[in-house]
Amino acid sequence: MDFFDLTGKVAIITGGNGGLGLGIAKGLAKEGCAVSLVGRNQDKIDKAVAEMEALGAKAIGVQCDVSKEDDVNRMVEETAKQLGRIDILFNNAAISWGIAPEKMTLEEWDKFIAIDLTSCFLCAKACYPEMIKAGGGKIINVGSAITKKGFGKLVHYAAAKGGMDHMTQSLARAWGKDNIQVNAVLPGLVHTEMMPCFGPDKIGPLVDYAVKKSPVNRYGMPDDFEGISVLLSSEASSFITGSIIVADGGLTLAI
Amino acid sequence: MKFFDLSGKVAIITGGNGGLGLGIAKGLAKEGCAVSLVGRNQDKIDKAVAEMEALGAKAIGVQCDVSKEDDVNRMVEETAKQLGRVDILFNNAAISWGIAPEKMTLE
């Protein structure tokens, strides 16, 4: 048996049209997985699909607002129709910005929680029947190492990501009987559009501080998550479920 | 790049002569890793090494009491000498038994 082989498997990656999600997709594709890249921005989806196809991967793009149940159901249906099955779900889509909690309106809060947390429930629920059909599945929630710390201007983000951690554990219990393993990966500082670590938009002081403190003396790149994504998607992790795995280069230990 | 390739790597697995340790050793060997199986019981070591070799793995056994510094240093030295390098360490050896804390002596 090849522990990590994903040949014939199909993965949905929300927020798969860029950043960390595209890194995850590349990792899975290297092991033979077909990927459905889900996002809101069609231009970014088209570019990401082209990038995957250039690597020889089987990839489709599905436009979807993951905070909307109908849209999620359609996205899952379309993936299953085009790629034949669903084995793996990465709940990776997220938005974030810093704001003091006393300045956040209820509307902003509700919208944020719908995108960053409720979406994970909707996607998991929609994929569940397909995973049952496939004889099992893997759900990987991409959380944040922020849940190991606190940040005054990211109360909303911490609440959503903390919710994902606990959803991970309870989903693992709920669907263990169905041979579905549910785990969470918690990245720390990773260079993405949302958190530029170099270039003109680099968030200078924060990045420099984190790199100096980090045991690995660098920030993460999307391809740092290829290996762990393959591990948690493959047979190699059949005994790992309900685990919340910090993958931050040791940053949360150091700040 | 192959993410999980361990060809040319050498791993020391304490308590590698049985149970979980031997399971770990088999996993590493499947990815091409050479393994040094460390334990106290020479019979179990010999059997474990034979089992690994039957799977086509490169394996050596080193008898060692991992609670003794001199013994540990010798074990590491011997592994490095026989397998050329040390890349990976699994601190897996352990003992355990149930006992009420008030009945346990300091020794």
Image: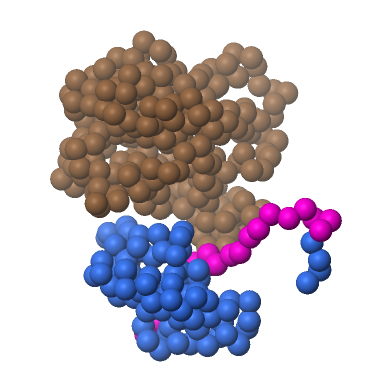
Magenta: main secondary structure: loop
Identify whether A5 is placed above or below B51: above
Residue B43 spot, x, y in % from top left:
43, 76
Task: Give the residue at x 65% y 58%.
Answer: B97
Identify whether B24 is placed above or below A105: below
| Rendering quarter of residue A155 | top right
Q: Is residue A11 visible?
A: yes
Residue at the limit of the structure toward the top, as seen here: A70
Q: Which residues are magenta?
A: B84-103
Task: Give the residue at x 55% y 67%.
Answer: B93
Chain B appears what colour?
blue
- The residue nearer to you, when weighing A21 against B80, is B80
- The residue nearer to you, when weighing A238 against A13, is A238
Chain A appears what colour?
brown
Residue B86 is inside the magenta segment: yes
Residue A97 is inside the magenta segment: no
- The residue nearer to you, when weighing A117 against A49, is A117
Residue A247 spot, x, y in % from top left:
50, 50
Residue A222 spot, x, y in % from top left:
39, 48
